[in-house]
Image (tube, grey):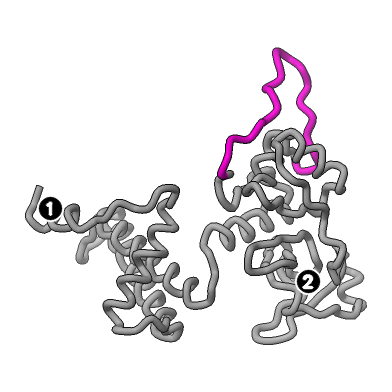
């Protein structure tokens, strides 16, 4: 082991019990920012520009790898260098997310699941692993048929998606309060019925109220510790492209002739 690597290993503190890797990244990344910038205050403009630079480095390394694979002349790069640049991008994105109070597991899983739901894929992510063992249904024996929902998900799939912690179940657009309670009973969790205070419904046409333009239809819901009521909105200009927004960022959009044709 090199002296430099030995110093790195020696400087790593043991993370608190129960702290996963992304939580450790958030904590230590914030500590390093404070030491580096001599301030607790994040700098979103600097952080976004830093990410842009690192993303460009990723593209540059990939360009060199592809060039080498095609036998063209020019400077070379290694897969290890690509790993370094990808790591820099993730570190920068964590810093930028921290500046706005966003948590990577929550926003990544919400966006990934919204896109899967909009396109009919059964591939979903759990925002966080459950903090206790879940009582999942037993695997069917032999050729016993497996019941699936309209997205091809089994009961076990749904339990893994809904289970987040002892206190909270993520509301689902496709399940009644009774269904949630039945699932909660299997897991010894308190059931939370779907939020009755939502302003918009699935299929309703909405548009962003500020910033970049985005108009489309509600295709799903989400809820996090920072966003009590959020929506997955599929773009009417680009089918299959989904963005997530808190309720305050959206307003109802009138049904136009072109929107009617798109339905």
Extreme left residue here?
Answer: 3
Q: Residue at x 65, y 86 (%)?
A: 211
The CA span between labels 1 and 2 is 53 Å
Q: Residue at x 71, y 19 (%)?
A: 140
- Name which residue lies at 14% across and 54% down: 5
Note whether 237 is above or below 105 in the view shown.
below
Mark carried by residue 216: 2
- Residue 145 placement: quadrant: top right
Start-end of magenta stretch:
131-151
Which circle marks residue 6 in the picture? 1
Relative horizontal placement of residue 8, taking residue 192 as reference (left or right): left
Q: Secondary structure at mark 1?
A: helix
Q: Is residue 37 above or below residue 104?
A: below
User: Element under label 2?
Assistant: strand
Above or below residue 213? Residue 201 is above
Where's residue 104, x and y in %?
51, 62
**Residue 139 falls within the magenta-colored stretch:** yes
Residue found 58% across the figure and 39% down from its top: 132
Spot occupied by residue 186 in the image (x, y as percentages of width and height): 74, 33
Which label's residue is closer to the chain start, 1 or 2? 1
- Find residue 263 and report its horizontal and vertical position in percent: 88, 64
């Amino acid at each position: 082991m090199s002296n430099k690597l030995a110093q790195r290993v020696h400087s790593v503190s043991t993370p608190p019990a129960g702290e996963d890797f992304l939580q450790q990244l958030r904590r230590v990344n914030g500590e390093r920012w404070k030491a580096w910038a001599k301030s607790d205050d994040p700098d979103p403009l600097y952080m976004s520009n830093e990410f842009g630079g690192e993303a460009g480095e990723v593209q540059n390394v990939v360009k060199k790898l592809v060039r080498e694979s095609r036998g063209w002349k020019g400077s070379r790069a290694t897969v290890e260098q690509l790993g370094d640049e990808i790591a820099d991008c993730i570190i920068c994105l964590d810093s930028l997310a921290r500046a706005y109070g966003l948590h990577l597991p929550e926003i990544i899983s919400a966006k990934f699941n919204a896109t899967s739901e909009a396109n009919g894929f059964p591939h979903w992510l759990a925002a966080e692993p459950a903090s206790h063992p879940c009582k999942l249904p037993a695997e069917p024996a032999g050729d016993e048929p497996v019941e699936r929902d309209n997205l091809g998900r089994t009961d076990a799939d749904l339990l893994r998606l809904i289970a987040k912690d002892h206190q909270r179940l993520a509301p689902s657009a496709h399940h009644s309060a009774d269904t949630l309670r039945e699932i909660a009973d299997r897991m010894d969790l308190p059931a939370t019925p779907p939020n009755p205070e939502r302003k918009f419904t699935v299929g309703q046409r909405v548009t962003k109220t500020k910033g970049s333009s985005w108009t489309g239809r509600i295709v799903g819901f989400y809820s996090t510790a920072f966003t009590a009521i959020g929506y997955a909105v599929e773009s009417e200009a680009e089918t299959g492209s989904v963005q997530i927004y808190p309720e305050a960022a959206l307003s109802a959009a009138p049904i136009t002739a072109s929107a009617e044709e798109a339905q």
